[in-house]
Image (cartoon, rainbow, N blue to C red):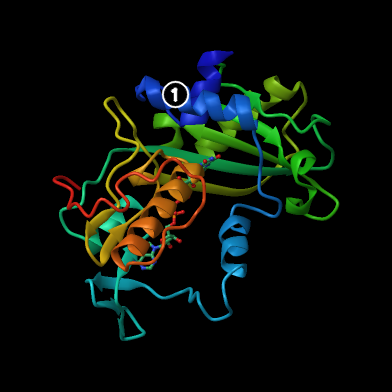
Amino acid sequence: MLRPLLVSLLSDPDLTTSSRCADLALRGYARGRLCLPAGGASTVPELLAAALPPGTVRTGVRAVSASTTAVATAEHGEIGCRAVLVATGAHDAAELLPGLRVPAFHPVTVMHHTADRPPLREPALILAAGGRGPVAHTMVASEVDPSRTPPGRVLITSTVLGASAALPAAELDRAVRAQLAAVYGTSTAGWELLATHHDPYAVPAMPAPHDPRRPVRLLSGLYVCGDHRDSSTVQGALASGRRAARAVLSDFGAPPDAGSDTNAGNAGTGSVPAAA
Ligand SMILES: Cc1cc2nc3c(=O)[nH]c(=O)nc-3n(C[C@H](O)[C@H](O)[C@H](O)COP(=O)(O)OP(=O)(O)OC[C@H]3O[C@@H](n4cnc5c(N)ncnc54)[C@H](O)[C@@H]3O)c2cc1C
């Protein structure tokens, strides 16, 4: 069970990830189990934004350059500021902050099928890596979170990792259906392919030695966070954001958050990192 579980937790079919990161993933799995945000992945940033005063967050604004005193945007002019925290993925961060390290990535393709009835009545993640087909894991998503489901239908969500993730959509769908028929023990011929999402830069690779506490403070007034500064997960992105927020507070002389996060990293040291 361990190998397919790690493949799925790390999005890494060759298991080239640092064993320390694998330990962290297993620890998270053992302590927290698995979950999906009700309503979809966007629920997490929406909840974070909802806790802020109205008007604090503006979406749909693309930054084209950033400095300690201003952010230039594609269509909304220049916005002056006292500090900038770049919270994009690694590629976009390196465009805004030239010289920033860009890691290798694990590609991921997610396929959503709908059907008349659930092939399994259980909110379970089924590990399929190493089986006959491209799917690493699959679940009846409507059994986990009914709010994601098209009315009167069920939703089956399957994830493809590695080189297979880049196969043309129709070819991939054929191979995925054949494998899912065996996995669920039912015909998948009548299933409808709702959507295929391919992301070649889905998950930053974490080969050894991986530094899960990469500096988030580049200069006083210029900060960077995201999964590429920590571990390649939502938790890693959130932890790096917390470290960056603490660095901003420290540079501005504000009392640090009294939260109990022990991942405070370089916050408050006042040092400029040697390597970003
Ligand atoms: C298909 C898929 C499945 C995944 N499954 C899991 C999972 O099950 N569990 C897990 O923990 N992780 C998973 N991940 C990884 C997880 O999604 C990421 O680690 C996490 O979203 C990283 O958060 P982030 O805030 O660093 O970056 P992102 O979530 O990528 O957010 C960066 C934001 O910056 C914005 N942006 C980029 N450039 C600019 C610009 N120039 N100006 C303004 N805004 C900009 C983007 O639009 C985006 O909204 C998955 C990733 C993918 C692609």
Residue 93 as seen in the image, left or right of residue 87: left
Above or below residue 144? Residue 8 is above
Residue reaching furthest bottom?
Answer: 77
Q: Nearer the viewer, residue 61 or 211?
A: 211
Above or below residue 70? Residue 116 is above
Residue 143 as seen in the image, left or right of residue 260: right
Does label 1 point to a residue whose CB lies under 8 Å from ligand 1? no
Q: Position of residue 23 (x, y in %)?
A: 46, 22
Numbered disc total: 1
The residue at 48%/44% (across/down) is 261
The residue at 75%/40% (across/down) is 144
Q: Position of residue 248 (x, y in %)?
A: 34, 63
Please indicate, yes or no, whether residue 180 appears anywhere in the rendered image.
yes
Q: Nearer the viewer, residue 275 or 153?
A: 275
The residue at 76%/51% (across/down) is 149
Amino acid type, mark 1? Ala
Q: Nearer the viewer, residue 230 or 60?
A: 230
Residue 115 as seen in the image, left or right of residue 42: right
Please indicate, yes or no, whether residue 134 appears anywhere in the rendered image.
no
The residue at 54%/81% (across/down) is 55
- Under tag 1, what secondary structure? helix
Q: Which residue is mark 1?
A: 22
Residue 179 as seen in the image, left or right of residue 187: left
Within-10-Å neighbours for mark 1: few <14, some 14–19, many 20+ = some
From the image, which quarter does the N terminus lie in?
top right
Above or below residue 241? Residue 77 is below
Q: Position of residue 80 (x, y in %)?
A: 29, 83
Q: Nearer the viewer, residue 252 or 204?
A: 252
Figure quadrant of residue 63: bottom left
Above or below residue 142? Residue 94 is below
Q: Position of residue 27 (x, y in %)?
A: 54, 25
